[in-house]
Image (spheres, helix red, strand yellow):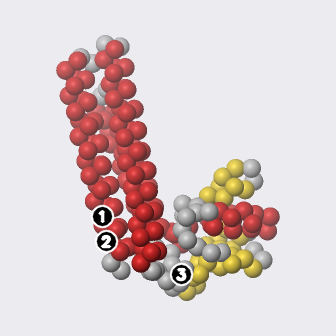
Amino acid sequence: MSETDLKAIQRRMDGALEVLKKEFGGLRTGRASTALLDPIHVDAYGSSVALNTIAGVSVPEPRMIVVQVWDRGVVKAVDKAIRESGLGLNPQTEGQTIRLPLPELTQDRRKELSKIAHKYAEAAKVSVRNVRRDGMDGLKRAEKDGDITEDDHRRLANEVQAKTDEHIKKIDEMLVQKEKEILNV
């Protein structure tokens, strides 16, 4: 395993952080945002597609999101995907237009959003740990193949673990920040 392999591990772990930032951006804290619907995928055309690829999403009012579905045949699938997304939204369908009034953030809803944030953070941690596992497997293979020595293996394993710990810490910090934002708005 070389420096480029360590950079690849770093890049993949950074990718998990970027995904988490995007998901956290979609968790609303009072205002409607098109990013709220970014994680939603719809079962349409024989596969799972991102909502924003089959519909236009806009925010005409601070507490309303409007989804304009381009194909009449997938309106029911879009409605179902939104209902099952766990975002607590209740779609109102009118033809190819789906209106999503955002409920007032009650204390219960804030706790629910906090749980969703925890779920996103845990998924990011699992992703980072999977990258670490792949890196460690690569080290074992490299040592077995004679590409690196036992000392190099130990040193590189410590570096991979340090990167993992650093990214897990960042995830925890991001979660604490998002929780403050959700619960104290």
The residue type indicated by label 3 comes to Pro
- Tell me the CA gap for discs 3 and 2: 20 Å
Check if mark 1's residue and mark 2's residue have beta carbons within 8 Å. yes
The residue type indicated by label 2 comes to Lys
- Tell me the CA gap for discs 1 and 2: 6 Å
Quadrant assignment, res 60 = bottom right
Closer to the N terminus: mark 3 or mark 2? 3
Q: Nearer the viewer, residue 115 or 16?
A: 115
> Could you tell whether 31 is left or right of 95 in the image?
left
Mark 3 residue crowding within 10 angstroms, few (<14) / some (14–19) / many (20+): few
Which residue is at a point 24% across and 17% down the rendered structure image? 149
> From what the image shows, is residue 60 above or below residue 108?
below
Quadrant assignment, res 181 = bottom left
> Could you tell whether 170 is left or right of 59 in the image?
left
Which residue is at a point 50% across and 75% down the rendered structure image? 33
> Could you tell whether 135 is left or right of 22 in the image?
left
Residue 176's disc number: 1
| Residue under label 3 | 103
Question: Helix or strand or loop: what does disc 2 sit on?
Answer: helix
Question: Helix or strand or loop: what does disc 3 sit on?
Answer: loop
Q: How many numbered markers are drawn? A: 3
Closer to the N terminus: mark 1 or mark 3? 3
- The quadrant of the picture occupied by the N terminus is top left
Residue 67's disc number: none
Which residue is at a point 37% across and 41% down the rendered structure image? 129
> From what the image shows, is residue 145 above or below residue 77?
above
> Could you tell whether 50 is left or right of 132 in the image?
right
Percent from the top left, x then y, of residue 132? 35, 36
Percent from the top left, x then y, of residue 157? 26, 30
Q: Can residue 35 be seen? A: yes
The residue type indicated by label 1 comes to Val
| Residue under label 2 | 180
